[in-house]
Image (cartoon, grey):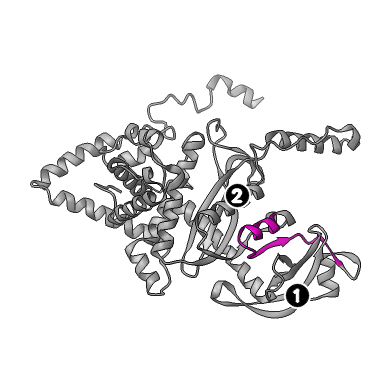
Amino acid sequence: MLMSEPAHFIKTFVDDLDAALGKLKANAKLTALQKIWLGFCLTGILLTNSVCWAKFERASLGDYQIAALSWMFREAKIAWNYLLLASVTVVLERHRLTEGVLVLDESDRSRSKRTQRIHKVHKQKHKASGGYVNGQSVVLLVLVTPSVTIPVGFAFYMPDPVLTAWTQEDKRLKKQGVSKNDRPVRPERNGAYPTKTQLALGLLQAFKAAHGAIKIKAVLADALYGEAAFMDEASRIVDGAQVISQLRENQTIEYRGKKRHLKNYFNTINPGVAVTLRVRGGKDVKATMSSARLKVTAHGKKRFVIALKYEGESDYRYLVATDMSWRAMDITQAYTLRWLVEVFFEDWKLYEGWGREAKQLDEEGSSRGLILSLLLDHCLLLHPEQTARIDNKLPAYTVGSLQRKSQMDVLLVFIKSVLEQQNPADKLKELAGLVDEVFQLMPSGKHLVGRDLGCLEPTASLQYRAAG
């Protein structure tokens, strides 16, 4: 896919972004060159689905050089700390958004085995193979509103390597039968490696500080965040709004002075009843649900606990909520919105550059590359055809279909620019030469033409050995 200039809707977005930066901080505005560079990069991600300077150079037929693109990325005095904040502001104002639900989740991105300069890369469990890979983990904060779903914050996570080493050694010694007194004492966590819950609380605090006018109806998170400290602090940050997470089936609650496992309580004492849930404001689904306001032992206080299983499922999942004045049905239906973060992850990795070749080095490379990919997500939300759909209360277009349409629009602009030349035929010859220069063909190691393959047949003098 070729381009002669940034896509028109991306130019408009960059202009709006520049204006928002100026309101946040006077000296944060982009220079003319920075605006051109940013528009080109976003268009490059749109066309190549990667944050890769070599691919960007090829898409421009050499008009933009790898060295220049990389230098701007590393050295230009762009207010990177404000870019995502300004972009979120532009989307919120354009779509006139005043309220929503915040969803927290994390996403892993596998990297190669040699990753010395990839920011916060660490060993991760590879779900597909059951083994381990090196990769990055990103904690993301997504705002779900009545009209659009927007990524609004991120933080890279890495486990404390000292704690990780201690855990592995402790398990090994425990397996050998070494008593606890004879095993090494658990080291203190290094503050340079905050937990995922600490990062999540930081993201909530940053969003609240930057966009305090947005009314948060609820905060949703999976079982990793279902601990008392996180839920109470998250609720405090968002002015007492509902916080919904999950509990494990073996966690205990207190009922009539006795401690019981959640699984035991909801399967024997408080069995569920058949209900119909409206999932994400759309289709109705059948489920079995039970609920009670119970003291959760690990939390040391009463919570609203809900046991839920959808039709066809055999086991309950257990939701937990901080605000006990909500109805069980409302809590359950609100929690279905958490699935939208998974849809965002899929779009983000498939179409917006983060899933392929976003291998920029060091902390600034990883952070800035991720910011560029999130800016493209915001940019697509502000595409004229997308905003027209949303303004008219119609279902928004998918990211994939909007990307493909935008790619063709960019290509048509490129073709039009060629045809508008005084001599299109000469221009095409010039471009043909650039194609040969920029798109260099590389030798393959798969095909063996020109190589000595050795003798691939029996040796006559050795046939008697085979007979013997």
Q: Position of residue 175 (x, y in %)?
A: 85, 38
Residue that appears at 38% across and 56% down: 379
Q: Position of residue 334 (x, y in %)?
A: 61, 70
- The circle drawn on residue 146 is none
User: Residue 357, can we see it?
Assistant: no
Total label count?
2
Q: Label 2, secondary structure: give it.
A: helix
Name the residue type under label 2. Answer: Gly
Q: Position of residue 264 (x, y in %)?
A: 85, 67
Name the residue type under label 1. Answer: Ser
- In this view, the residue farthest toward the left is 422
> From the viewer's perspective, is residue 416 above or below residue 131?
below
- Find out whether residue 238 is within the magenta segment: yes
Does residue 151 appear left or right of residue 20 in this picture? right
Q: CA distance from mark 1 to mark 2?
A: 33 Å
**How would you rate the neighbour count of disc 2 (Cα within 10 Å): few for under 14, some for 14-19, many for 20 or more?**
some
Residue corresponding to mark 2: 202
Q: Position of residue 294 (x, y in %)?
A: 80, 68
Q: Label 1, secondary structure: give it.
A: strand
Comes first in the chain, label 1 or label 2: 2
| 1 vs 2, front mark | 2
Q: Nearer the viewer, residue 248 or 36?
A: 36
> From the viewer's perspective, is residue 10 above or below residue 125?
below
Residue that appears at 31% across and 40% down: 58
Does residue 18 appear left or right of residue 133 in this picture? left
User: Residue 197, can we see it?
Assistant: yes
Q: Nearer the viewer, residue 113 or 88?
A: 88
* Residue range (magenta): 230-254
Q: Nearer the viewer, residue 301 or 143?
A: 301
Residue corresponding to mark 1: 290
